[in-house]
Image (cartoon, helix red, strand yellow):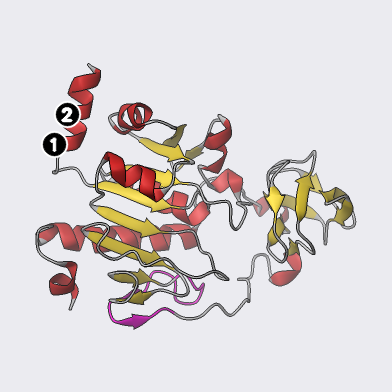
Amino acid sequence: MTHVRFSEFLSNRSVPFVIVLGTNEIASAVAARLTQEGCRVVISHDPYPPVIRRGMAFHDALFNDHTEVDGVQGCRVETALEIVRALTVTGVVAVTSLQLTDLIALRIPDVLIDARLQKRRMTTNLRNIANLSIGLGPQFAAGLNCDVAIETHPDHAGELIETGETRPNDHIPRYLGGIGRGRFVYSTRDGVWRTPLDIGARIFKNYLIGLLDGHRVFSPMDGFLRGIARDGVVVPQNVKLVEVDPRGRASSWTGSDEHGRTIADAAYRVIAKARRRCWARSVTETYH
């Protein structure tokens, strides 16, 4: 049975094999949508920046927690056999700490999507690794370090960039319940993050949320924890550590939101367009 699964996975090119870099809520929304459309998707964790919206992501599957986004389940995989087993089950995303170099040794992906949203780090050149490479968010330039880029800026989410660059990061969080940057807590130093709280916890202004490198971190307002870094992770300085949802009964912290779904829809449209053409043709010819 194992041999049959491997042979089918390696030979079946009618079902796109997609690698998504990142286990955050945007990467997870994309992975869930593509899985619903019949793709075989594996998402690869990167520790920077830490994932905080864990109820909206497959991230916690890495710790063997149950994860589900829009009806799609995440399954932790750490070997080639586990990846193949997971990807031959309908409605499952394979979630791994294996990196891109490990995954392409198994099979060259049809689609590679960088959804790590590393706004302060140098962006990897994705081109020529897969038949189609897609970059999400700032620092991507179509034809330079990816084939197609997709905007993640709240005012332009889902816009396709087929030539030129995406908008730079303006460091202005989108509003939720009328509050922007004020609902977040940012790390003021490098260190190990310790907290007894989890996603969905009810908190109040000045409530002690946890300790970063031994220093106390307090809630900026009343609300529910929409995002919080997992206990025990190593956190770099100046990244989002906590997000509070101030909307009261309207608060939500599970499943994809409209922002994530918009970006996921855009990614699917790019892939569907490429599939209608021919994978064998160069992406440059397809889009330019």
Magenta segment includes 110 = no
Instruction: Note whether 33 is above or below 240 in the view shown.
Output: above
- Mark 1 is surrounded, within 10 Å at the Cα level, by few (under 14), some (14 to 19) or many (20 or more) other residues, namely few
Residue 68 % position (x, y): 49, 37
Mark 2 residue type:
Ser
Q: Secondary structure at mark 2?
A: helix
- Region of the chain picked out in magenta, as a range: 152-166
- Mark 2 is surrounded, within 10 Å at the Cα level, by few (under 14), some (14 to 19) or many (20 or more) other residues, namely few
Identity of the residue drawn at 30% across and 70% down: 148
Q: CA distance from mark 2 to mark 1?
A: 6 Å
Identity of the residue drawn at 39% across and 30% down: 79
Q: Quadrant of the C terminus?
A: bottom left
Q: Main secondary structure of the magenta part?
A: loop
Q: Is residue 100 left or right of residue 175?
A: left
Residue wearing tag 1 = 11
Tag 2 and tag 1, C-beta contact below 8 Å: yes
Residue 103 % position (x, y): 35, 43
Residue wearing tag 2 = 7
Residue 64 % position (x, y): 55, 29
Q: Is residue 189 left or right of residue 265?
A: right
Residue 15 visible to an observer of this rendering: yes
Q: Secondary structure at mark 1?
A: helix
Residue 247 visible to an observer of this rendering: no
